[in-house]
């Protein structure tokens, strides 16, 4: 055993002197091969002459502590072969002599091998580490092998073995696949990939991990500092809240003391008045009692005299009686009470009570989670390609109360359909509203995100669908509806004098089946989905429902016309709430006909016989009204349809044959149209709807047509009417109208008890 090891040690020493100038760095060639070729040959010769040759099949070489194994010898031979000239090759047979075509080439043996010999090569200990390539790669891989630093790689300590090739040590690392591999893997699964020493890969990974660990430690310190800072901020919030609570208690106590003092003063005054009145009346009673006593004595004396019957005494009795009555009249001037019982408390001005209910206020900073992001105008979540998408953030504090001052900082990030992103500038109105807009130039889904102090506002991120423009002109020219459904009756899917219609975000068409006192919901293809409602005045019942709309939460809002109220339902018909009653005061109705809702949930109602529209908060609280009350009501006569267009409200003025466009302040309005059957004229207009572009769609009822206008009043298209030749498009007094998310116009054909979709 000593002989072979001595030869190996000698060779190791020679090679150490001979190849010390050979560069073995990652990614660089083995060079200079030519300068060490003869040295390597001599070294191999020394090794084989010393007894180490191919016949030494029983020799086992160490692989650690600087000793070379057969792996090194195979790589030395490979390094020598790389310097040989490479010639064009043709198809070769395996060197086994069986005449089998060669599939591989051994660079160590310089022989062509068939697949069976390749397997045998890997089973023999002295050849299992040879470099074997595919035959066609013999020349192509020369330069690649010159680049491979692992050709002279010594085996690694703590060996791990390849799972794909038995007994093969994992000595290399494939950069292309990020996996440890053996020599055989370089020929087959990882041929042509970039490799490096496994040891070097470990060192690189270690260095990178140390760097990442350092970064992680810095991040950890930053996080710990942030946690400490936030905890201190929480402590300050708690401390500050205690101080504010003390201020509230102090203010309340001060006002309570003032109120209690006022209470004492008022009660003291009441006591004084009571004593004075009682003293006057008591004195009067005393005098009257004296008079009554004297008169009683006189009466008794006179009666006794009359009973005695003596003539002279009877004559004196008259004189005595007159004297007694005279004394009473002098002594008691009147029997009328000298005072009254008037003591009353005069209530303070109502404003004072309101002042107490709103006494003081608690202010806070903006709360992202309570602030609301909403799209301005048009459909809730769509906009047309090429237009500007406008949004508003309604700032709220941590109690959910609106903020009426500016100065808050919101960040806006918009993601386009192609996944690119950009930021939008925010305009501060100074009144708690923050607006921003951006051009929607790509068709598809935009994602709008809004943050304040790193937290998203309510309804953020907001998904906005950008669609192509709607071409009404071509549809009107075709004149053919894409869908009609419904007929007269009371069964599912049948209608009786329907009026209102709306469409939810999922495309369901919701119809107010008026004379059947119910709502029916249809799929977008016109098939019946479900219904709810019965005749009556209890919650969830109807008396001739007319207008219907859907809010952002998918709730259905219904104008329960003859019950003079508004009802709100879930999509499945579950009753949510209601507001309103018959009357003419604010918040009361006299046949509410239509209803509309905007992006922030405010509800507009046409109060038909009160000749006005009313505006309510999402919970039904009265906010504002617009109309001509009193002697001027004829200037706004029986409004019917209503719709929101951005901040404006569009109303059909039924008996005046026109549209009323009410400005955002609800103090002024302008008019569109006049009576007639020409373009821009109406005859009893009913329903109205606004599409994604802000175009106005009107059901021109007694002209039996639908007119579509631009936001400024220019005519775009007319559906139906006297010139219609297509029988399926003929309408009889169209009433409700809506625009679907797909851009189609759905109309309630009132006289024909059906729905038409253009």
Image (tube, grey):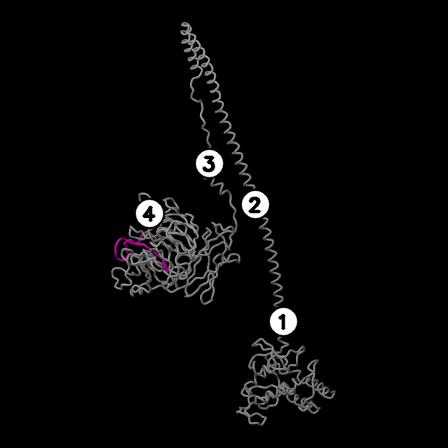
Q: Is residue 311 magenta?
A: no
User: Which secondary structure, mark 3?
Assistant: loop
Q: Is residue 580 above or below residue 147?
A: above
Mark number displayed over residue 207: 1
Of the numbered discs 2 and 4, the one sitting upstream in the chain is 2
User: Which secondary structure, mark 1?
Assistant: helix
The residue indicated by pointer 2 is 245
Contact, CB < 8 Å: mark 1 with mark 3? no
The residue indicated by pointer 3 is 348
| Image coords of residue 148 (percent x, y) | 60, 81
* Quarter of the view holding residue 165: bottom right
Of the numbered discs 1 and 3, the one sitting upstream in the chain is 1
The residues colored magenta run 671-696
Quarter of the picture containing the C terminus is: bottom left
Of the numbered discs 4 and 3, the one sitting upstream in the chain is 3
Quarter of the picture containing the N terminus is: bottom right
Residues 617 and 110: in front is 617
Q: Label 4 to label 1, Cα distance in Å?
A: 83 Å
Q: Disc 2 vs disc 1: which is toward the camera?
A: 2
* Residue 606 seen in render: no
Of the numbered discs 4 and 1, the one sitting upstream in the chain is 1
């Amino acid at each position: 055993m000593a002989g072979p090891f001595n030869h190996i040690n000698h060779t190791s020493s020679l090679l150490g002197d001979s190849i010390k100038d050979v560069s073995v760095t990652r990614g660089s060639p083995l060079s200079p091969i030519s300068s060490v070729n003869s040295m390597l040959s001599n070294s191999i010769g020394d090794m084989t002459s010393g007894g180490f040759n191919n016949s030494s099949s029983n020799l086992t070489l160490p692989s650690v502590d600087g000793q070379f194994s057969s792996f090194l010898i195979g790589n030395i031979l490979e390094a020598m072969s790389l310097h040989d000239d490479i010639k064009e090759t043709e198809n070769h047979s395996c060197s086994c002599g069986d005449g089998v075509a060669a599939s591989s080439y051994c660079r160590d043996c310089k022989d062509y091998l068939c697949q069976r010999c390749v397997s045998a090569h890997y089973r023999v200990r002295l050849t299992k580490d040879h470099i074997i390539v595919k035959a066609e790669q013999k020349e192509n891989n020369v330069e690649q092998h010159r680049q491979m630093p692992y050709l002279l790689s010594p085996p690694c300590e703590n060996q791990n073995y390849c799972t794909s090739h038995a007994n093969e040590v994992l000595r290399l690392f494939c950069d292309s696949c990020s996996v440890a591999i053996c020599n055989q893997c370089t020929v087959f699964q990882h041929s042509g990939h970039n490799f490096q020493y496994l040891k070097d890969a470990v060192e690189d990974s270690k260095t990178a991990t140390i760097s990442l660990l350092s970064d992680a430690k810095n991040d950890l310190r930053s996080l710990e500092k942030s946690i400490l800072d936030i905890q201190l901020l929480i402590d300050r919030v708690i401390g500050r809240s205690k101080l504010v609570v003390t201020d509230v208690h102090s203010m309340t106590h001060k006002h309570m003391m003032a109120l209690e003092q006022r209470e004492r003063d008022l009660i003291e005054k009441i006591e004084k008045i009571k004593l004075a009145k009682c003293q006057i009346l008591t004195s009067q009673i005393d005098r009257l009692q004296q008079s009554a006593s004297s008169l009683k004595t006189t009466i008794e004396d006179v009666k006794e005299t009359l009973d005695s019957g003596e003539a002279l005494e009877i004559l004196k009795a008259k004189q005595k009686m007159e004297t007694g009555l005279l004394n009473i009249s002098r002594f008691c001037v009147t029997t009328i009470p000298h005072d009254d019982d008037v003591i009353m408390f005069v209530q303070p001005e109502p404003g004072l009570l309101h002042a107490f209910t709103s006494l003081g206020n608690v202010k806070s900073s903006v709360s992202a989670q309570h602030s609301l992001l909403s799209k301005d105008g048009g459909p809730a979540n769509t906009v047309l390609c090429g237009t500007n998408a406008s949004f508003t953030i309604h700032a709220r504090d941590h109690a959910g109360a609106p903020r009426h001052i500016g100065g808050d900082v919101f960040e806006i990030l918009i993601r386009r359909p192609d996944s690119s992103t950009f930021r939008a500038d925010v305009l501060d109105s100074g009144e708690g509203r923050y607006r921003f807009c951006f051009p929607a130039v790509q068709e598809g889904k935009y994602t709008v995100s809004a943050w304040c102090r790193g937290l998203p506002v309510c309804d953020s991120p907001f998904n906005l669908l950008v669609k192509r423009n709607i071409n009404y002109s071509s549809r009107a020219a075709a004149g053919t509806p894409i869908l009609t459904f419904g007929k007269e009756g009371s069964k599912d899917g049948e209608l009786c004098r329907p009026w209102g219609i709306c469409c939810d975000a999922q495309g369901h068409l919701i119809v107010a089946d008026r004379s059947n006192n119910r709502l029916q919901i249809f799929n977008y293809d016109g098939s019946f989905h479900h219904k709810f409602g019965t005749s009556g005045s209890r919650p969830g019942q109807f008396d001739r429902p007319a207008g219907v709309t859907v809010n952002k939460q998918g709730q259905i809002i219904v104008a329960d016309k003859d019950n003079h109220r508004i009802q709100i339902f879930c999509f499945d018909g579950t009753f949510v709430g209601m507001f309103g009653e018959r009357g003419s005061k604010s918040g009361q109705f006299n046949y509410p006909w239509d209803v509309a809702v905007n992006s922030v949930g405010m509800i507009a109602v046409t109060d038909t016989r009160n000749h006005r529209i009313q505006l309510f908060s999402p919970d039904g609280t009265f906010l504002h009204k617009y109309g001509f009350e009193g002697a001027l009501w004829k200037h706004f006569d029986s409004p019917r349809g209503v719709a929101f267009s951005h901040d404006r409200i569009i109303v059909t003025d039924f008996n005046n044959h026109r549209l009323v466009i009410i400005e955002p302040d609800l103090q002024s309005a302008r008019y569109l149209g006049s009576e007639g059957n020409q373009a821009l004229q109406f005859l009893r207009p009913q329903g109205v709807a606004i599409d994604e572009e802000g175009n106005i769609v009107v059901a021109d009822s007694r002209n039996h047509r639908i007119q579509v206008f631009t936001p400024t009043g220019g005519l775009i298209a007319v559906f139906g009417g006297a010139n219609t030749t297509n029988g399926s498009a003929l309408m009889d007094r169209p009433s409700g109208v809506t625009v679907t998310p797909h851009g189609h116009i759905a109309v309630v054909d009132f006289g024909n008890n059906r729905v038409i979709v253009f």
